[in-house]
Image (cartoon, grey):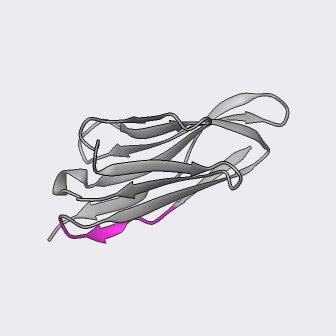
Amino acid sequence: QVQLVESGGGLVQPGGSLRLSCAASGSIFVINNMGWYRQAPGKQRELVAAIANGGTTNYADSVTGRFTISRDNGENTVYLEMNSLKPEDTAVYYCNAYVTMKDWRRDNYWGQGTQVTVSS
């Protein structure tokens, strides 16, 4: 099994910044892809940003130029640096990891979610 633990959410004013972290632990051989999704009230969960094991990144159009995803493969951790935050960025942010485990099984895992609220 694999556990994802997120941290770094909170309340921030428009134009402010936050940094989210997500640490994976468990029977991990390699984490293939890691990403951040978000879900606002009444809306579907959507991809915010993703990063492959080799470092290739992918961003939603709405966050391109404002958010940066990065990862530390040695620590099995993914980060999301969020700048120039807007009220429409308010959502629960979920970490996601597609993992190859030590017994060679592959599975998709989610964190518990962390609330980000952008408001004055």
Identify the image quadrant of the C terminus.
bottom left
Residue 118 lies, with reference to residue 32, above or below; the image says: below
Q: Nearer the viewer, residue 70 or 108?
A: 70
Residue 13 in sight here: yes
Which residue appears at 40% of the width and 50% of the height?
68
Magenta span of residues: 7-14
Which residue appears at 51% of the width and 49% of the height?
70
Q: Nearer the viewer, residue 113 or 32?
A: 32
Kindly indicate the quadrant of the structure image that contains residue 100.
top right
**Residue 10 in magenta?**
yes
Residue 113 in sight here: no
Left or right of 11, for residue 86: left
Kindly indicate the quadrant of the structure image that contains residue 52.
top right
Kindly indicate the quadrant of the structure image that contains residue 84.
bottom left
Which residue appears at 29% of the width and 42% of the height?
64
**Residue 74 in magenta?**
no
Residue 8 lies, with reference to residue 90, above or below; the image says: below
Which residue appears at 41% of the width and 40% of the height?
49
Question: In x, y percent, where is residue 3?
Answer: 66, 51
Taking the view exactly as shown, the residue that stands out farthest to the right is 103
Taking the view exactly as shown, the residue that stands out farthest to the top is 105
Left or right of 25, for residue 50: left
Identify the image quadrant of the N terminus.
top right
Question: In x, y percent, where is residue 82?
Answer: 34, 57
Total residue callouts = 0
Question: In x, y percent, where is residue 74?
Answer: 71, 52
